Image (tube, coloured by chain):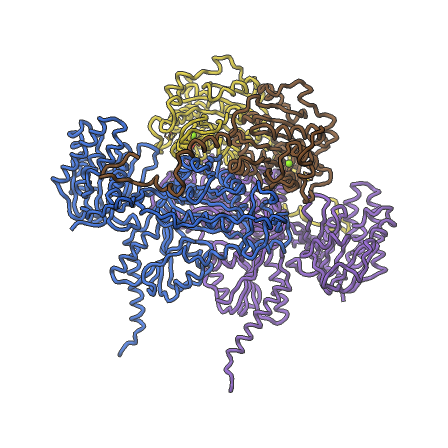
Chain colours: A yellow, B brown, C purple, D blue
Amino acid sequence: MAVEQAYAPKDFKSDLKPIWCPGCGDYGVVQAIYRALSAIGRPPHEIAFVSGIGCSSRIPGYTTAYGFNSVHGRALPIAQGLKLANPDLLVLVAGGDGDGFSIGGGHLPHAIRRNLDLTYIVMDNQVYGLTKGQLSPTSVRGRKTATSAYGSLEQPINPLLQVLSYGAGFVAQGTPADMVGLTALIEEAIRYPGFAFVNVQSPCVTYGEEHQQMRAQKAVMKSLASVGHDPADYLKALEWATHYTHDLHTGVFYRNPDPPPTYEQLVRERQAELGRNALPRERILELFVQRTEGGVLADS
Amino acid sequence: MAVEQAYAPKDFKSDLKPIWCPGCGDYGVVQAIYRALSAIGRPPHEIAFVSGIGCSSRIPGYTTAYGFNSVHGRALPIAQGLKLANPDLLVLVAGGDGDGFSIGGGHLPHAIRRNLDLTYIVMDNQVYGLTKGQLSPTSVRGRKTATSAYGSLEQPINPLLQVLSYGAGFVAQGTPADMVGLTALIEEAIRYPGFAFVNVQSPCVTYGEEHQQMRAQKAVMKSLASVGHDPADYLKALEWATHYTHDLHTGVFYRNPDPPPTYEQLVRERQAELGRNALPRERILELFVQRTEGGVLADS
Amino acid sequence: MATTDLIIGMAGSGGDGIVSAGEALMAAAAREGYRALMTKSYGPQIRGGESSCRIRIATGRLHSAGGALDLAVALNWDDFLKFGAELTVSGSTVVVWDSASGITADRLPLPGVTPARALAVPLAELTKTATGSDKMKNSLVLGLLSGWLGVPAAAILAGLKKRFLRKGEALWQASERAFQAGFEFARAEPLDDAVRLEPAVRPAGGAEKLLTDGNEMSAAAAVFAGCRFFGGYPITPSSEVMQFLTREIWKYGGAALQAEDEIAGVASALGASLAGVKAMTATSGPGMDLKTEVLGLASMAEVPLVVLNVQRGGPSTGLPTRAEQGDLFQACFSAHGDVLRPVLAPTSVADTFHVMVEAFNVAEQYQTPVIVLSDQEIAQRKETVDPIDTSRIALVERQRPGESELQDYKRFLDTESGVSPMSCPGTPGGAYLGSGIEHNETGAPASSGVMHTRMNDKRFRKLQALRQRTDLFSEEGDAGAPIALVSWGSSAGVCREALARAQAAGLRAKLLVPRLLYPVADDVYVRFFAGVQAGLFVEQSYQGQLHRLVRMFVDLPRDVQSFCRSGANPFRPAEVLERIEALAQALQGRLEDAQPVEE
Amino acid sequence: MATTDLIIGMAGSGGDGIVSAGEALMAAAAREGYRALMTKSYGPQIRGGESSCRIRIATGRLHSAGGALDLAVALNWDDFLKFGAELTVSGSTVVVWDSASGITADRLPLPGVTPARALAVPLAELTKTATGSDKMKNSLVLGLLSGWLGVPAAAILAGLKKRFLRKGEALWQASERAFQAGFEFARAEPLDDAVRLEPAVRPAGGAEKLLTDGNEMSAAAAVFAGCRFFGGYPITPSSEVMQFLTREIWKYGGAALQAEDEIAGVASALGASLAGVKAMTATSGPGMDLKTEVLGLASMAEVPLVVLNVQRGGPSTGLPTRAEQGDLFQACFSAHGDVLRPVLAPTSVADTFHVMVEAFNVAEQYQTPVIVLSDQEIAQRKETVDPIDTSRIALVERQRPGESELQDYKRFLDTESGVSPMSCPGTPGGAYLGSGIEHNETGAPASSGVMHTRMNDKRFRKLQALRQRTDLFSEEGDAGAPIALVSWGSSAGVCREALARAQAAGLRAKLLVPRLLYPVADDVYVRFFAGVQAGLFVEQSYQGQLHRLVRMFVDLPRDVQSFCRSGANPFRPAEVLERIEALAQALQGRLEDAQPVEE
Ligand SMILES: Cc1ncc(C[n+]2csc(CCOP(=O)(O)OP(=O)(O)O)c2C)c(N)n1
Ligand SMILES: Cc1ncc(C[n+]2csc(CCOP(=O)(O)OP(=O)(O)O)c2C)c(N)n1
Ligand code: SF4
Ligand code: SF4
Ligand SMILES: [Mg+2]
Ligand SMILES: [Mg+2]
């Protein structure tokens, strides 16, 4: 594009040097985020970027946004409080498959049903990177890891199907093996007015398996557009989502064609409506007053 | 049936007098459980019944099974440990919509993907009964409660769609307004070899709304059998599940026609396989021995 | 002579409406200018179980729910007896019950007590005669009370009218008739002067009394202090805080979130605070357990946050509807690692306002989570509260970076005070990385022992100033007394009352009431205990937690002991008084022993 | 004369394999009959960052990682310097580095220290000459060490062979050649006798030394103690416990569950224990925070449970890979309500075995959760461990109801000891309702103050017996000494060593090492401190938590102080010794002052 951009991708890059392993997929994800933010055009200081704990959760520190590398699994509730307190901010949330679907998995349905305008990016590498290679909730059955010496006994979860069942308005999947596509998805997710979820198949080069690496992904990935999926079709989206762990589909699974109002919009409306007859705050105690008027209770 | 039953429904009824409000739907649920257990025929002492906290979670105390009225939201993980420690037990889990889908919502996908042979009964009354009438995650949008004086701003979750997306092998919905149906569903759920989920529309007479009460339910409930749904059809089950909050469908949404092995079966196989060459436990320390044989490390 | 201080206890079944009768009486008394205090208690059922209330009405200040009842009203003896500890009958109690029960005065089910007077009243019958049904027994009881106590009928009827007219003219008329029947009965069968109140001083035109409970008061205080975000999850006995705020906070431009659990509740509040908004959460014991990790994060990332814990009986689910002061250890020490987190506690409904505002001030000033320990007793009891002059209360806002500090912004600048200016998203130049990981001044992760020591120093140093806040302690009684009490929270009021009685009886004693429980202000205790020969920490927990906590930091005189017990066993002023008397006697004995014996 | 005790520190980049060289050296030394102890340390990167290890080898018993290095090997100075606190160079250190770095002996980047000897070795060059590439520098370093230290080449080569042969004959040959080149260099350029080890006593045929770390040891102890269920969630530095158990527990008929979070981890363990199976969980600080509520439930429902907390630096995410003893307060006090929960701590890898077994015994005996406080240092350091005679260790099983008790089974029978027979599902007649709600003896919910007091009494009473367990304390040194140390966990070993040195220097001192931290065994402390004039609690936490904890229950002599500091700053024996000397001098000064002055 010839349009000049107010902020270049590098304006979103901080001085902190990433300590990811050489070749980690997360390098690509943070690059895609820089580019998407540049396309969006909001200044870094108007962005809050919240994460949990994990290799992937280090990502806010590598941006020039206000970054909060919180505790394991709690990025979404923190981000919701932050967004409600200041709806003018652009709020990004990111983390790993463990952070988001295991310890943090209980927050996801509720963040989604509230529908705040948040963009949630999960770097789904099917393993626990930071703690050195244990099972993750998206690890395939039979996978051998530090905590599954003989192969895991459980079925992985299906994050795409889950977030669809939770009612997310925007659901997509990308990979750093397709940087152009990933950048576009993240940009579109940010622009979607409501909760947007992007699952990124971001390879762990240290604890991941061969078939999860970029090279393998490039060979098998297939865009949903190329198979003719219409992102407005919710039931079809559910069906495509069932392919997770078998096929690597990229692109938008679902985009609500008629986005409902966000939670913060409803809150602002309520504040405006009820705020009109509010007392000055020093008079909050008047709610407790027992008025006497000649012994008869006033009807106030 | 003319078959004599080893245990009558009353054999499962304890001496503890329920302190539910007169008319509470949960009276019907516990009755249905007594009857289903009688049909199953296992003695009460071979049953462990785990719940969280809530009006509904009092239910184990009203049975003669081993009852554990644990803490809010943690019934499922406790039940999993219990079942793994003694797979011969019949393990029931029960609780409310708040207990199971709000504070305990993070445990549900993982209990389901592990697929232990548990039966999980939720008394979904769309409100917090025990704490006196606050919003629940299944309360409809706009619902006024003690914590939503002006109506709730959020979309409810859809528990049926959720558990289907988690991969539950048996998913059903019932109501005490149809005691025969509810009893049959609970019995079938217990018989299903794997994780089984029964959502019960159990009215809260004290904090519920008119249209949630038994009388109203009787007028609108419709069985899935009557609409010709085939419980083996997963995609169709997803579609019927999207009707939650709009229609009251009873019956089995999904029953996996080809149930995979349960987690405890896999665990037993693993124990058998690996246990064969195990040392007696006093010799566990031999794993740490550095053997010397003429200065050359033995290859043991 | 009539009395200036009176305690009435009533019990009945769920449908009897005995609690709402109590509330009507209390409201009327308040409007008449009395001070009043009311506690309620219910059976375990959500609906239809037994219920009771206990109302104390006085012409002067009230500090506690008091001791044995002066007047007991049992709509039903079975129900009444279920509330043993709360509704104690003594030899000076006047006991009233429904004669329909068939129980006669000589066969009262009160083992070991003979009340001052026992009067069976045909409650159901009178009601039926007056209204055609026995539904309005509570209105009849109100009539009785008005007649006996001397609380003006007009004041009570005004309240009843307001309530019943909404439901229809017929109901209101029935209520009024039942009331009148009761009133007339009372006039015909007067009780002792001991249950007749001196008239109160009616408040002058402008000075309006407040009537509320600790939960609503804490929520109102938060709004006043500038709290504009609440995130929480319902739990007894704190839910009313959220219920108040979900009604009111929007009006002030704030928002309240019913989160999916307590972790999300406190995490959302932390998020709001990061955004620059004053924020709080409220919960009770089990919820506190769950909030621990995020509270540790707030300490590490230096985020202002107020956490209200309305204590109930523990451990675990425990006794959800009963008061206990058993969460002090947890408030101080729940998070892993070396953390110093201020803990405050109010002693009454009125005090809750001040303590909550102070909690926000401390949180903002020092960028720290602050825990407020209320308890079920304070939180759910209703009190009359004298008007509060809010114009004299200063509010603190967190320090933000100025132009120059934003030049090369260091979020965790190691200043002399230990407090670093905190920027919030939206401020150009103020972006930083906040985290629970140990970090250097800019916020970048750091794991050296040197940096860890330095940052621990900073985090502890900034809170040392609190230990000088003598205004967060009140000392009462005779400063030079040899006998000293320390008490906090809802037990403090009981001790105040006991102290007053002890002084009236000529005993030399004093009382220290800390509102700041942690960090332990060692100087305050050292000064208070200088010259003290015997003392008691009075608190309602099995372990006597404040006593142990203070011992960690202060060498107490040997004869300072703990007077403590499990929750759901509220202290009564008389028993504390007894302990003071016993201490005084022991001291006397010691003096005597020390006298040289002449042979 | 050669030495009997030697500390080697090495650092390099991730690819250099310096840690595996250290492991090879340690294993060889162990097989030769030496005692050895090794700690490792890494940069924050998962892969490719700097790494280091510190190996102490001795002919006699070892208690700690010791102080400054005797021999320092820097493959790369930049990397070496990042480990300042762990790899301290002193005036008596021999320093070796790669001459390829261009740094010369007179320009060493060691401010303020002149090492005893500085020797640049052409590490890369020699390796290249020997093998054709510089990849095998670590094998070359092993050759150097073998030559200098005198650890037999055959022992080291046997280990290398085992490792490299798997990867191919060529690699093994390269490794051997590099080793030989190093060995010859060392022979040609011998170092001081101070870095040459006395020969060890090779173990006799049967007596095999163990070599492991605290995490694996605790997991093995659990299996031995009969633990058959583990539920947990990965977290540094405890994950290896779960990793061991997910490999081994199945073999014993048990199961291990990687739960979705720490709450589910401990909840599943509680469930397994309810089913009658010994169960545990393991975690570190942030995970402990999350487990709080379920631990409270375990206390209330009286469920045996072992919880291993491998402490790391806190608060919050803190310093995940560094040791700290900062979670003691949390271990004792995290849950709301009045709870008494035993807390144990091991002092070394070997001790971990005994303490973990004891934890299961206490949990089962008293039907209580037990917390074991390990720390990153003990958990992740490798030690040689003398063979443990497990036949002499008694295992405790929980009390189950007999026939007669099952007649009218009361799960929470208020027995004299406070312990009630516990039935498990499957037992006819034994069904009961377990809950976190306060209950009566049968388990039915109860909320009266009377029942609450009675049950609190029972729950506290049953654990009082623990306070008499003097076997959970060790006292070392001169029993009548005027100077006393108390230390626990990984700091205790440092104090042991300091005490030995103090005694060797003629100072009269003693040391108390509690393995039972809570409940505080007040009698033990009172007895230990009787006659003590000065003392120190030595612990690695900012607040000196054990010192404060003991003060809660024990009146300590005035001059017993805390010697504590933040984590990631391990104590060294020399500095503890210094403090003992200072105390001795102060006491001496006091004595002199007390002498009458002749005028
Ligand atoms: C409460 C808590 N539990 C556990 C941990 C340890 N931990 C840190 S990151 C992590 C999981 C990392 O996996 P994932 O979220 O998939 O991120 P990745 O490193 O793979 O990007 C765990 C278990 C923690 N820091 N806090
Ligand atoms: C950790 C914790 N948080 C909150 C509570 C308070 N609490 C008890 S039950 C309940 C919700 C009840 O609702 P639901 O689960 O739907 O059950 P119901 O009473 O409606 O049957 C809550 C919030 C608690 N006991 N523990
Ligand atoms: S461990 Fe895996 S996820 Fe973590 S930085 Fe390395 S490659 Fe990336
Ligand atoms: S409050 Fe509602 S759910 Fe609870 S017992 Fe009463 S009717 Fe049932
Ligand atoms: Mg991952
Ligand atoms: Mg409910």
Let me know if residue B151 appears in the view. no
Residue D557, quarter of picture: bottom left
Q: In the image shown, does C47 or A231 lie closer to the viewer?
A: C47
Q: Residue furthest bottom?
A: C599
**What is the x, y in percent for residue D42?**
32, 38
Depth check: give the residue in front, D8 or C181.
D8
- Residue positioned most to the left: D188
Q: Quadrant of the N terminus of chain C?
A: bottom right
Query: Total label count?
Result: 0
User: At 42% from the left edge and 63% from the top edge, which residue is drawn?
Assistant: D526
Q: Quadrant of residue C567?
A: bottom right
Above or below — where is C118 with respect to A31? below
Q: Quadrant of residue B277?
A: top left
Name the residue rendered at 42%, 26% in the picture: A33
- Relative horizontal placement of residue A102, taking residue C223 as reference (left or right): left
Image position of A262 (left or right of C184): left
Q: In which quadrant of this rendering is ligand 6 seen? A: top right
Q: Residue at x 70, y 59 (%)?
A: C88
- Out of C44 and B65, give the one closest to the viewer: B65
- Is residue C540 something that shows in the picture? yes
Q: Position of residue A266 (x, y in %)?
A: 60, 31
Where residue A36 appears, as percent x and y from the top left, is: 44, 23
On the image, the x and y values in percent for residue B40 come to 64, 32
Judge by depth and name the residue closer to the eye, D390 or B81: D390
